[in-house]
Amino acid sequence: MKKITIFVMLLCLFAVAGCEEKETMQNIASMDSRTASYDVTMKRDLLCLMMAYPEYITDVKREINGSVYVIMKSGKRILYDDKKEKNHNEKLANADLQDMMEQIYPLSDITNLMAEDFDPGRARVYALLKEVYGGSKGQVEKNLIPVKVGYKNYSFNRNNKAAEALQSVMKELVLLTEKRQDIRSCVFPASGTFNYRVIAGTNQLSAHSFGIAIDLASDKRDYWKWTSRKEGERRLNSYPREIVQIFEKNNFIWGGKWDPGTLRMNLPLGSHGMTDCLLKMLS
């Protein structure tokens, strides 16, 4: 009887050990899967950044501790992921490159306001923008050139082909304004481009501060602090989609695809050139 009891106890111990080993193996497999997914996303993000800023990002470095940095033309290093847990507002206030690239901007048309806290393009790494477009008001102003919109010129940043992109947009839009009054009323007059200021209620610089944004059809009813979702949705669907499509085709993003937004057009990213060197470096 004693031998049988001991045998049963040993079977139980082996069973427990087997279950623990299986759970450990499953945890390791799960961790490996998450790590692999993270690495794929990181490579995608960094490749997109190198494609967007080919004249300004010269290298990508991975340190011994695993930290990955984007190396700018000036030599400045910008960390990809600070590994900090952040809520949406914290990401907007103190974004790293991973935060900035986390939400994917939808290129398809929308008829409803975006979900709460969905703001692709609003989380900005200012160290990157300053390297590309100018680190101070004076430096940005030196990079501004006039872009003709109808009979008026608007100041826009020439770096990273931003002004060239806006010029391409306006050439196409001005032709449409001759046939479409609804488009004409949005384009003329534009509400502004360069304006060195912070975003209301924050200490963060607006995209206008870098001369890479333009407001069209500005309406005080659009301001998120007092616009209802119902009114916002009605306004959203009143905008001519041809305007949005032409801007997006030229690498702008639409503030209407933020929660909620107006007909703002921002150019935090361009998309010029391709390279496969990143995949080689990080593989």
Image: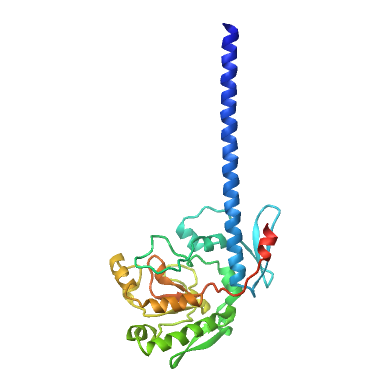
Q: Residue at x 53, y 63 (%)?
A: 101
Q: Residue at x 52, y 52 (%)?
A: 85
* Quarter location, residue 57: bottom right
Q: Residue at x 57, y 24 (%)?
A: 15
Q: Residue at x 58, y 77 (%)?
A: 133
Q: Is residue 211 above or below residue 16?
A: below
Question: Is residue 235 shown left or right of residue 203?
Answer: left
* Quadrant including the N terminus: top right
Question: Residue pushed farthest top?
Answer: 1
Residue 146 in view, yes or no: yes
* Quadrant including the C terminus: bottom right
* Quarter location, residue 229: bottom left
| Spot occupied by residue 212 in the image (x, y as percentages of width and height) | 51, 78
Residue 81 in view, yes or no: no
| Spot occupied by residue 11 in the image (x, y as percentages of width and height) | 58, 19
| Spot occupied by residue 169 in the image (x, y as percentages of width and height) | 47, 83
| Spot occupied by residue 104 in the image (x, y as percentages of width and height) | 49, 63
* Quarter location, residue 112: bottom left
Q: Nearer the viewer, residue 225 or 41?
A: 41
